[in-house]
Image (tube, rainbow, N blue to C red):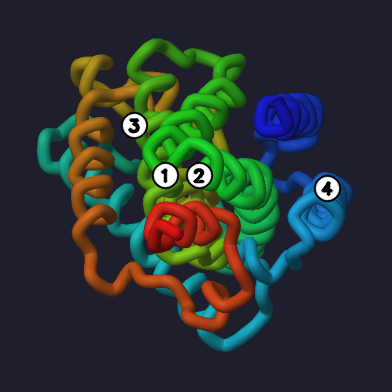
Amino acid sequence: MLVLLVLSAAFVMATALVGLVSTDSSSEWWTLLPAVAAAIAASWVMMSTVESSSLAALGLRIRVPAALDFVRGIGVGTIVVSLAVVALAAAGWVRWLPDTGSVWMLTRDGLVFACLFGVAAFWEELVFRGYPIQVLAEGLGSRPAVLLTAATFAALHGANPGIGWIGFTNTALAGILLGIMYLRTYSLALVTGTHLGWNWTMSFAADLPVSGLDWDTPAWDASIAGPVILTGGSYGPEGGLLLSAITILGIVWALRARWLTPDPEVVALGPLPERRVRQVTAPAA
């Protein structure tokens, strides 16, 4: 029951606050900060009062290893999206045309996009891949935890313009990828970086819609053509089967990558899934 209440609260909070994110690239990213503060406060209450643990056990730590994880995560998200964009360009289904815009505008908007998507990514990862996925993994096991949080993550995007069954499925697949990466590392920095790299590359670098939301990049405009079932059409690549295939490959990689290992110091703090591991492996009395 507690697990259902936590997930329900996370979903309601996410749904209520997602309207803070505007499709205008000049949006004031700091308006998301109250949502981040609420998510941190809720996580602290659950970890300290219910679990007798700390936020650091969720992987919420400010240290050099976390910074390195963040950079690695940006690389992962960038690579996944870049593979899709390169494939679309090679097939002739996306083209870029010059647009008005100065170097100053390009630099300014690039930083604004990074701040907005970075704060939004951290909030979503804390809400879905923080306490909820840990407590689910403790009670039900890792696979159900990943699937349930991925489904809820996809449901959050269910009202986005132009979403169809492929877009919904791809969002769930992205949630599975992020869930696996998190439970293998207990690093919120890693999955936040991956989320940021994914969205920033799709929106700013490629000037393509992200989950149906269109962002305007100065200096160039993207035009999508070709079969919608593969390209995603107005929803962006996340609505096409091409990104489905690439994300599935990313999931396979995440399951096998040897460098995805938890920080021993975080494990020592007692992440909730580790309790299940200890219970399963404890010798019989």
Q: Earlier in the sequence, mark 1 or mark 3?
A: 1
Give the Cα distance between marks 3 and 4. Answer: 34 Å
Amino acid type, label 3: Pro
Disc 4 packing (10 Å; few <14; some 14–19; many ≥20)? some
Amino acid type, label 2: Ala
Disc 3 packing (10 Å; few <14; some 14–19; many ≥20)? many
Give the Cα distance between marks 2 and 3. Answer: 31 Å
Residue on which disc 1 sits: 142
Tell me: 66 left or right of 142: right
Tell me: 23 left or right of 252: right
Q: Secondary structure at mark 2?
A: helix
On-image quarter of the N terminus: top right
Q: Position of residue 269 (x, y in %)?
A: 63, 74
Q: Earlier in the sequence, mark 2 or mark 4?
A: 4
Front in this rendered view, residue 257 or 74: 257
Residue on which disc 2 sits: 137
Q: Earlier in the sequence, mark 4 or mark 1?
A: 4
Residue on which disc 3 sits: 237
Q: Secondary structure at mark 3?
A: helix
Residue at image location 48% in from the left, 36% down from the top: 140
Q: Secondary structure at mark 1?
A: helix
Residue on which disc 4 sits: 42
Amino acid type, label 1: Ser
Mark 4 in CB contact with mark 1 (< 8 angstroms): no
Q: Relative to 238, does residue 264 appear above or below in the rendering?
A: below
